Amino acid sequence: MKNIVILISGGGSNMAAIVRAAEHERWAERFGARIAAVVSNKPDAGGLAIAGAHGIDTAVVPHKDFATREVFDEALARVVDAHSPALVVLAGFMRILTPGFVGRYAGRLVNIHPSLLPAFPGLHTHQRAIEAGCKVAGVTVHQVTTELDHGPILAQAVVPVLPDDTAATLAGRVLAQEHLLYPRAIAGWLADTLSHIR
Ligand code: GAR
């Protein structure tokens, strides 16, 4: 069985969408893959309870307990590696990762970012899209490289920016697409990649 480890920092709605897709689309039978663990850098992340309710192992590695990014990432990698992951999925994981961590999982580390990359890497993507006068916005699933919110694009979805949008209304429209796009992109990755190494 190929293990997927999902990293979160908050509500975990993307993680929940992936977990639901894995169950409903029978990823274990179709791809020989399962969600092995959900790991948070925040003890109060709402997504931990959702994962637990689905019988998935959870763990917390609180970044505040570590003096540097490097030692935090080493501790995080130890927890992740305990599950021998074929794929590590960043789903609202709001920490910048060190080159050491990114390199360790090269080719099997993916992220979702709420903009049409390469536009608007970083934070406050929806407000920035509105202020730039964008007529469309969206979401990107990409492989993670050492440059923040860059890396080969695996999938994108586009939504309109409406005249009376606020950052919150646009975020809601984008998030609905995230929940469709991320499971679909991961299923595509599993179909392409694991078929060669199973
Ligand atoms: C999502 O909108 C995701 O795209 C974004 O955080 C939110 C997490 O929501 N990620 C980033 O901004 C990463 N740079 P969730 O915890 O409900 O999935």
Image: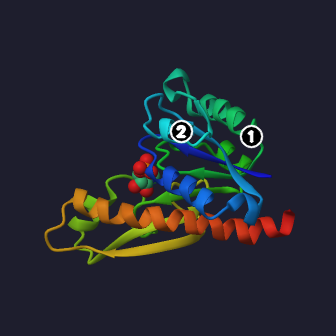
- Image check: 92 left or right of 142? left
Q: Is residue 182 visible?
A: yes
Please say if 58 is above or below 166: above
Please say if 14 is above or below 82: below
x and y percent of residue 76 in the render? 64, 34
- Image check: 91 left or right of 88? left
x and y percent of residue 164 in the render? 13, 69
Front-most of residues 158 and 14? 14
x and y percent of residue 66 in the render? 56, 23
Quick one: label 1 or label 2, which is nearer the N terminus? 2
Q: Which mark is residue 53?
A: 2
The residue to which callout 1 is attached is 83
Total numbered badges shown on the rendered structure: 2
Question: How many residues crowd around disc 2 within 10 Å: few (fewer than 14), some, or many (20 or more)?
Answer: few
Question: How many residues crowd around disc 1 within 10 Å: few (fewer than 14), some, or many (20 or more)?
Answer: some
Q: Which mark is residue 185?
A: none
Q: Regarding mark 1 in the picture, which secondary structure is present there?
A: loop
Task: Report the Cα–Cα distance between label 1 and label 2.
Answer: 19 Å
Amino acid, disc 2: Ala
